[in-house]
Image (cartoon, rainbow, N blue to C red):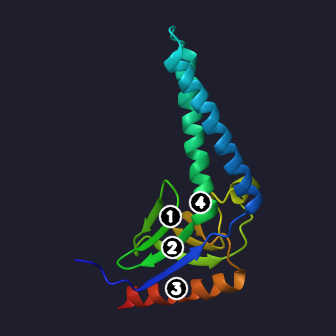
Amino acid sequence: MENKILYKIDIKKRTSWPLAIFLGLFLFSGIGILGTIIYGIISESQSFDEFYFSAFILLVVLIIVADILLWQLKGVESIIIDNEIRLIKHGKLFEMKRSIKFNEFESIQVANDLESPFWIKIYGLGGGKIIFNYLGRKAKIGQDISIDYAEIVADEIDRIITQYKIG
């Protein structure tokens, strides 16, 4: 049986076009290099273990780059509240989910993220203006929204969670 959704919001990731173009070119070049390495492995009569290792490492790097590129182009952050708080980042190869039970939830706040490293924020891998505090940890979401909009969302979420805990 599906739980009744009390609140749901989807926040679209704003595309950083210079970064997306760079990642696309990197991915395209990397696929060409990987193809060359695989061709070399297949066509050579002698086996070189370095080629296998290089191909594997390059494949892992290309998968990570493809994930970041998809996040830049199609990324969406979702906040869903039903019988728990679910924070989901989707539109990429590896969907990231975090669930917070109501009894673990401590507070919600809004702030410009000054803690996350610059390179994490520029790639869109972390940070956010809406901060969920739970079990002594923080979960951040809403990388590309304004502080005003983040306050509206946070107030609504706080109201819903307070109602849920009381009633």
Mark 2 or 1, nearer chain start: 2
Residue 34 x %, y %: 59, 32
Residue in the image at 52% along x and 22% along y: 52
Element under label 2?
Answer: strand
Q: Residues within 10 Å of mark 3 (few under 14, many from 20)?
A: some
Residue in the image at 35% along x and 78% along y: 83
Image mark for residue 158: 3
Q: Tag 2: residue type?
A: Ser
Residue 25 x %, y %: 71, 47
Rendered position, 134 above or below 56: below
Image mark for residue 71: 4
Mark 1 or 3, nearer chain start: 1
Rendered position, 52 above or below 101: above
Residue 98 x %, y %: 46, 63
Image quadrant occupied by the C terminus: bottom left
Rendered position, 56 above or below 116: above
In screen coordinates, is 119 left or right of 63? right
Mark 3 or 2, nearer chain start: 2
Question: Do residues under tags 2 and 1 come within 8 Å of each other at their CB atoms?
Answer: yes
Task: Tell me the distance, in whole angstroms, between the alpha carbons under discs 3 and 2.
Answer: 16 Å
